[in-house]
Amino acid sequence: MSEFESLKKWATPRQQSYLDAVEKQGSCRAAARALGVHHSGIVRAIASLKYQAAVSGHSPEHDMTHTVPDGYQVKGVSTYYNAEGKPTGQWVKSSLDYERQAELFKAWVETLSDDVRGKAQPVDAPKHCDADLLAVFPIGDPHFGLRSWWQDAGGDFDLGIAESLTFSAVDRLVDSAPAAKTAVLLNLGDMFHADNQSNQSKSGHQLDVDGRWSKVLQVGLRTMIHCIKRMLEKHETVVVRINRGNHDGHSSYALSLMLSCYFDREARVDVDISPQPFWYFQFGKVLIGSMHGDTVKGKDMLSIMAADEPEAWGRTKHRYCYLGHVHHHDSKEYAGGIVEYFRTLATRDAWHTAQGYRAGRDMCLIVHHKEFGEIERHRVDVGSLTGA
């Protein structure tokens, strides 16, 4: 049995096609040309398969041939050799190089994304757009997965409500938006109420959640895809930024990666996948900075932006910092620009209700001109969406 043939036990259908092509063509690059894919994807696929096989006990080049049943994982293998260098005994138990394991696991995750890469169906571009305009859609703290009960939180909220409200708000704002050539979908953080299946905050407090974490991720992804596709109907280019929140430090980045893979072959969508907490975007004489808002004070944002982007700061005249986290609206002008906090469409949970937090709920669209900065904005109140 060939090396690649033995690896097929752990391969997905796509990975099996990669292995067959490499065997037939003789190299990864030749196989990539024959399949019409980038050779790095094939290299990653083979590396991840070797990793999956190794943790199951199969790595012939290292004299590992005793596989374990599905659901089990080999921690390591100790092999004994004689004077001629031939294996004479083997102890299938030892520790792994965990740093290397993390690298291989990352490669495995990347190969899984290849199966969903470029799944977006093309959306017809608008025929006429104004290159002087920028449409910014800030989405304040969506908190998908939050479960609130009106009797102890003052309002009902669950996964279905979160999806419906976001769909409706974005649909209405896109319909009212001018045909700006460029749009920015700016998720201000805390897209997800919980960061994993433990349903706890970073400090260990139990969170009020609706549904399994995997389901919450699926609905959040589906909602962001809908938002992007709607914006593509009105705007030629859509820039997507998912800020990292204090509730979803890991899952927010996973969402960025999923969106990046989904729209991989859509040239009109640019998904920012930088892990940096601060994000900046220049449009003519307009400079926009953003982050979640949990680690710095609003009054410090402009000086941080000037330090991080000194050249863009010098080229621009209208500067804005858009933040979330606090769930209420606040805007203040400082020397050099404006710092603004945005509301959320989500209702309060029981804990924040008991603490006395109160604020309106809405979503906005802000229109910038490349020379004059903000020239108009549109607002959708949650009451106009629910009739309550």
Image (spheres, helix red, strand yellow):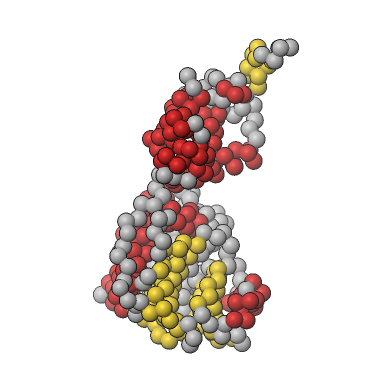
For residue 158, side relative to residue 305 (left or right): left
Give the quadrant of residue 145.
bottom left
Residue occupying the far left of the picture: 387
Query: What is the tally of numbered marks visible in this picture?
Result: 0
Foreground: 177 or 303? 177
| Identity of the residue drawn at 63% across and 39% down | 100
Could you say where residue 170 lies in the image, as x and y percent from the top left? 34, 70
Could you say where residue 150 lies in the image, as x and y percent from the top left? 34, 66
Could you say where residue 199 lies in the image, as x and y percent from the top left? 47, 52
For residue 153, side relative to residue 55 (left or right): left
Q: Is residue 274 above or below residue 57?
A: below
Q: Is residue 154 visible?
A: no
For residue 209, side relative to residue 234 (left or right): right
Residue occupying the far right of the picture: 83
Q: Is residue 113 above or below residue 256?
A: above
For residue 314, side relative to residue 257 (left or right): right
Image quadrant holding the C terminus, namely bottom left
| Identity of the residue drawn at 56% across and 56% down | 202
| Identity of the residue drawn at 38% across and 61% down | 224
Foreground: 364 or 123? 123
Q: Is residue 127 visible?
A: yes
Give the quadrant of residue 332.
bottom right
Could you say where residue 351 lies in the image, as x and y percent from the top left? 46, 64
Foreground: 291 or 28? 28
| Identity of the residue drawn at 53% across and 68% down | 292
